[in-house]
Amino acid sequence: MRTWFITGASRGFGALIAAQALAAGDAVIATARKPEDVVARLGDHPNLLAVRLDVTRESEAHEAVAEGIKRFGRIDVLLNNAGYGILGAVEETSAQEVERIYATNVFGLLNVTRAVLPHMRRQRSGHVINISSLGGYQSYYGWGVYGSTKFAVEGISEALHQELAPLGVKVTVVEPGFFRTDFLDEQSLVKTALELADYDETVGAMRRFAEGANHAQPGDPSKFAGAILTLVNATNPPQRLALGSDAVQRIADKHCLVEGEVAAWKALSLSTDIEA
């Protein structure tokens, strides 16, 4: 029996993955700001421990981990899932809005990771799974600040993968495309308070698209949860895992663009070395 530690477990991907992990016979430390919401969603299960956790508070991360270790003795899978989105142009996004989303999506992930890793290092085993986004691999208008938080998650995950591999701990960053969750609802997506008319053709169009796409996304959340269990069962999990046909296509398109630019500007790029 494995023990999972899942952030943002009261709804969305977190709740679905927790439910499938419990159904597979695993134990789950399911965290949320309101643990009663976890119980309401997942029910009363002998292998479920619902714990309060605001990821922006590092002390709560250590308390939640300690409570989970006391109950189950170990943590085998850390799923950093808590987070939210912000939709608006980079210029439209206030300093306060930027600080708030970084506090959850980046600093919160780091708080929880720092709390869990001493136990995984002691075990010389474990799997850290960080939920990023397609927006963490290719940014897009309207999603610049949100994407930047996920770019940070990507960079953190790459370094963790290298640092923890010799210690027996695996790290995977997951890049979902658009899945039919509540991500585009007000409870998961914030719109900037400022909206500038000059961005109507780009960011304004994205706002209108988001409203129309809500609950019409192509990805199946239950299949996403199943894919995460398949990932955890893999002997050699990947460093990156894109999920959704849209994510796979956009990543391929970006690779083509980057390779084309590198080739076109290669002579200038190479010309800046010191000559022997």
Image (cartoon, helix red, strand yellow):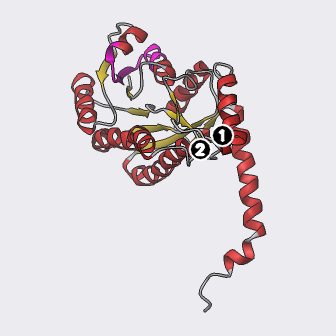
Query: Which type of secondary structure does the marked residue at label 2 adopt?
Result: loop
The amino acid beneath tag 1 is Val
Residue 25, placed above or below residue 160: above
Question: What is the C-alpha distance between the residues marked 2 and 1?
Answer: 6 Å
Q: Position of residue 167 (x, y in %)?
A: 37, 49
In this rendering, the answer to whether 238 lies above or below 40 is below
Residue 125 visible in the snapshot: no
Residue 121 makes an appearance in the image: yes
Q: For this view, does 235 lie left or right of residue 79?
A: right
Residue 203 badge: 1
Residue position for label 2: 89
What number is the disc on residue 16?
A: none
225 or 25: which is nearer to us? 225
Residue 211 screen position, x and y as percent? 65, 24
The range drawn in magenta is: 18-36
Indicate the quadrant where residue 58 lies: top left
Residue 26 magenta:
yes
Look at the numbered discs 2 and 1 and tell me whether their residues touch, using CB distance below 8 Å.
yes
Residue in the foreground of this view, choosing between 109 and 101 = 101
Q: Amino acid at mark 2?
A: Ala
Q: Report crowding for label 2: few under 14, some 14 to 19, many 20 or more residues within 10 A (C-alpha).
A: many
